[in-house]
Image (cartoon, rainbow, N blue to C red):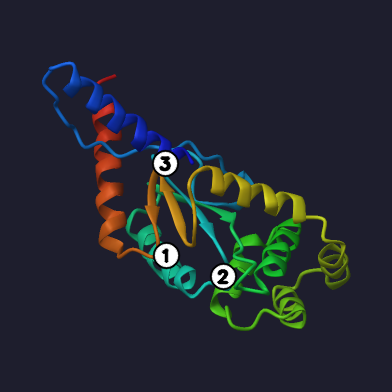
């Protein structure tokens, strides 16, 4: 896991310095993990100085709670923060999570990813195949095209890729976030997100001023 490995390497370097009899100065800097994102599932400007990459599960109650926090953040930091979504369905405990993720990809085919995403989280306890088709109809998607996409299972490999990428980055549950690469686990209070965002914006301002 990238997160654990980075921490282990840092601790190892401190121990080596101590054993060599040198002075050890500890600067607590957040570990950054490079995670990619899908431009088709990005909310906000791709040039925003802060990007939140979210790994989430449409049927997870904690993920649903986090969505309201993310909505507040987008409003507060309009133009400065973007949100990227990646799938991490907890299939062992949420039986409808996989198909909900596939349905969101089918909606994305018709340019309605975020509308469908919002409907899924607003109805996280109602995600049977019939429910998923009802949401598609409510967004005026082409019903036949949506049904064909959903029944084909064509997006299973892409969703599995998201899951594997998240696992390699150290994710063990949902929701999980990477704020400019800084890992944040769980549906944390808005203040926790804001502290990291403010620090990142301040660093970006200093970097711009130094040019």
Mark 1–mark 3 contact, CB under 8 Å?
A: no
Residue 191: image location, x then y, percent: 25, 60
126 vs 160, nearest the viewer: 160
Q: Earlier in the sequence, mark 1 or mark 3?
A: 3
Q: Earlier in the sequence, mark 3 or mark 2?
A: 3
Image position of 39 with respect to 27: above or below: below
Q: At x 45% / y 67%, what residue is drawn? A: 67
Q: At x 58% / y 73%, what residue is drawn? A: 59
Task: Check the image and name the residue furthest to the front.
Answer: 19
Image position of 195 with respect to 17: above or below: below
Quarter of image, res 95: bottom right
**Dot 3: few (<14), some (14–19), or many (≥20) neighbours within 10 Å?**
some
Say which residue label 2 marks: 118
Cα separation, mark 3 vs mark 2, equals: 30 Å
Residue 77: image location, x then y, percent: 34, 53
Cα separation, mark 2 vs mark 1, equals: 11 Å
Cα separation, mark 1 vs mark 3, equals: 27 Å
Q: Quadrant of the C terminus?
A: top left
> Which dot, 1 or 3, sits closer to the camera?
3
Say which residue label 1 marks: 71
Image position of 210 with respect to 153: above or below: above
Residue 160 in sight in this render: yes
Residue 111: image location, x then y, percent: 70, 58
Question: Could you say which disc has been placed on residue 3 in the image?
Answer: 3
> Which dot, 3 or 2, sits closer to the camera?
3
Mark 2–mark 1 contact, CB under 8 Å?
A: no
């Amino acid at each position: 896991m990238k997160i654990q490995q980075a921490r282990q390497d840092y601790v190892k370097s401190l121990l080596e310095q101590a054993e060599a009899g040198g002075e050890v100065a500890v600067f607590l800097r957040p570990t950054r993990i490079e995670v990619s994102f899908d431009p088709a599932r990005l909310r906000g400007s791709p040039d925003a100085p802060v990007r939140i990459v979210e790994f989430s599960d449409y049927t997870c109650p904690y993920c649903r709670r986090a969505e309201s926090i993310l909505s507040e953040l987008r409003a507060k930091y309009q133009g400065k923060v973007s949100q990227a979504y990646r799938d991490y369905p907890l299939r062992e405990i949420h039986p409808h999570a996989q198909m909900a993720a596939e349905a969101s990809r089918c909606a994305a085919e018709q340019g309605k990813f975020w509308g469908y995403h919002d409907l899924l989280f607003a109805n996280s306890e109602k995600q049977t195949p019939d429910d998923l088709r009802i949401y598609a109809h409510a967004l005026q998607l082409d019903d036949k095209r949506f049904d064909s996409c959903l029944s084909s299972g064509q997006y299973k490999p892409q969703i599995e890729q998201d899951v594997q990428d998240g696992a390699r980055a150290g994710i063990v549950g949902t929701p999980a976030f990477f704020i400019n690469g800084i890992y944040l686990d769980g549906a944390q209070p808005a203040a926790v997100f804001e502290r990291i965002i403010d620090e990142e914006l301040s660093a970006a301002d200093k970097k711009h001023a130094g040019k």
